[in-house]
Amino acid sequence: MLLEDRMPEAEVTLRLAMFLINNAYTSKDVICAVDGAQVQVGENIIFPIIDFLSANGWHRSKNKDAWQGAYVNNKYLQKIVIHSAAGEGDLVSELKNGCRLRVESKKGPLIAKRNSQEYPLVREAIGQLMTAEHVRDSDILAVAIPESEKFISLAKQWRTRPLMKQVGIHIITINRSNKITGLESFGL
């Protein structure tokens, strides 16, 4: 089902959404933007979104064949709501601390490769956050990336950079064991 050597962007976003709900960090539904090209291109399945969510206990209550819409899990009040509108952020969640988390997610390799794409992917996500049109003063801005040796190295370096700290952009790493690093920096 999942590729061993890389994590798609939709998987990064949905793992973070599930983590926020599972750990009671969010007070409302978690809204996720997933571009259709992240799910399927022609007949080629990029990420089996319905199967992935189902395997993790999340199911569509209506229109079970469509991948967009609200997913429910009987353990939680909150839903994961998936849409494909651009410009809102890959994940938006109202947190229990009164802030809104706005995340740009990136795909990436889970194992080291010769031609590293991690650096430009993280820079692209930072640029997307810096040019967001609708941001509140109470928003927490973050980049979510797969956990790999190279991504961890970049996250450790860039979390301490003066402008990253001044602007308040956080870097979150996510692995397939649902270990999330980087949320602790904003009190969750």
Image (cartoon, rainbow, N blue to C red):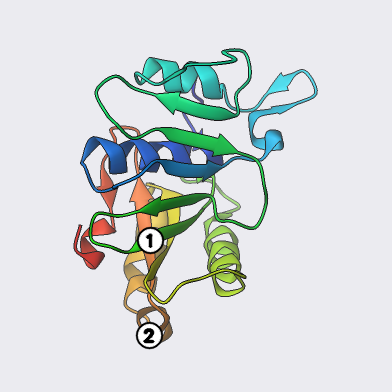
Say above or below: 105 vs 65.
below
Horizontal and vertical percent position of residue 177: 28, 32
**Residue 34 can be seen in this image:** yes
Residue underneath mark 2: 166
Residue at image x 67%, y 46%?
85
Say above or below: 125 vs 85.
below
Question: Which label sits in the foreground, 2 or 1?
Answer: 1
Residue underneath mark 1: 100
Identify which amino acid the numbered label 1 is placed on: Arg
Residue 99 in which image quadrant: bottom left
Q: Secondary structure at mark 2?
A: helix
**Residue 111 can be seen in this image:** no
Q: Nearer the viewer, residue 36 or 28?
A: 28
Position of residue 105 in the picture relative to residue 175 (left or right): right
Horizontal and vertical percent position of residue 3: 51, 26
Residue at image x 60%, y 40%?
34
Q: Nearer the viewer, residue 113 or 142?
A: 142
